[in-house]
């Protein structure tokens, strides 16, 4: 996942900070998946599926560290099943659309990733379809 904390060196802004919220936090995969307020509604829907699939009541508070949640959400846990993976995929698709429509994507990255463009980069880019 292309996030500022990984790609800031190549971005125009040279910033690790999340541009989707005003928290001042570095935009890491964990921040996007678990914390960024911009994606709260979509995250809530994803977590409801995850809780159900893990056998928890949807209103039950489940104590896990960010790292423990990431292990489940990224499919690295025995608990993760196909439905959880699908819910995460849907969350990521919605998140990416929000990034693209809010103008957070680097317009130069779109140019770098355009197959018709003479400028082609294999580096991570924030290309929006």
Image (cartoon, helix red, strand yellow):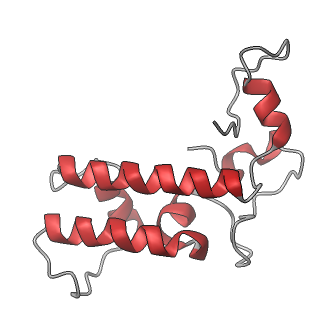
Observer-nearest of 71 and 114: 114
Looking at the image, which residue sits at the far right?
A: 12
Disc count in the image? 0
On-image quarter of the C terminus:
top right
Observer-nearest of 53 and 80: 53
Please give the name of the residue rendered at 88% of the width and 52% of the height, measured from the top-left corner: 13
In the displayed structure, would residue 116 be above or below residue 104?
above
**Residue 84 coordinates in the image, percent (x, y):** 25, 55
**Residue 99 coordinates in the image, percent (x, y):** 66, 55
**Residue 76 coordinates in the image, percent (x, y):** 28, 47
Residue 54 image-quadrant placement? bottom left
Please give the name of the residue rendered at 54% of the width and 57% of the height, measured from the top-left corner: 95
Residue 55 image-quadrant placement? bottom left
Please give the name of the residue rendered at 31% of the width and 75% of the height, measured from the top-left corner: 64
**Residue 45 coordinates in the image, percent (x, y):** 35, 70
In the displayed structure, would residue 109 be above or below residue 74?
above
Image-based side of 71 in relation to 100, left or right: left
Observer-nearest of 93 and 12: 93
On-image quarter of the N terminus:
top right
In the displayed structure, would residue 28 be above or below residue 86?
below
Please give the name of the residue rendered at 58% of the width and 71% of the height, measured from the top-left corner: 36
Image-based side of 5 in relation to 66, left or right: right
């Amino acid at each position: 996942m292309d996030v500022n904390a990984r790609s800031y060196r190549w971005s125009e802004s040279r910033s690790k900070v999340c541009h989707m919220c005003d928290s001042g936090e570095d935009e890491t995969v964990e921040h996007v998946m678990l914390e960024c307020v911009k994606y709260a509604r979509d995250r809530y829907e994803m977590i409801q599926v995850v809780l159900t699939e893990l056998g928890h009541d949807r209103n039950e508070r489940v104590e896990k560290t960010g790292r423990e949640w990431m292990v489940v959400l990224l499919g690295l846990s025995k608990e993760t099943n196909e439905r959880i993976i699908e819910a995460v995929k849907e969350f990521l698709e919605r998140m990416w659309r929000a990034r693209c429509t809010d103008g957070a994507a680097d317009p130069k990255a779109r140019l770098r990733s355009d197959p018709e463009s003479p400028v082609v980069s294999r580096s991570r880019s924030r290309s929006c379809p």
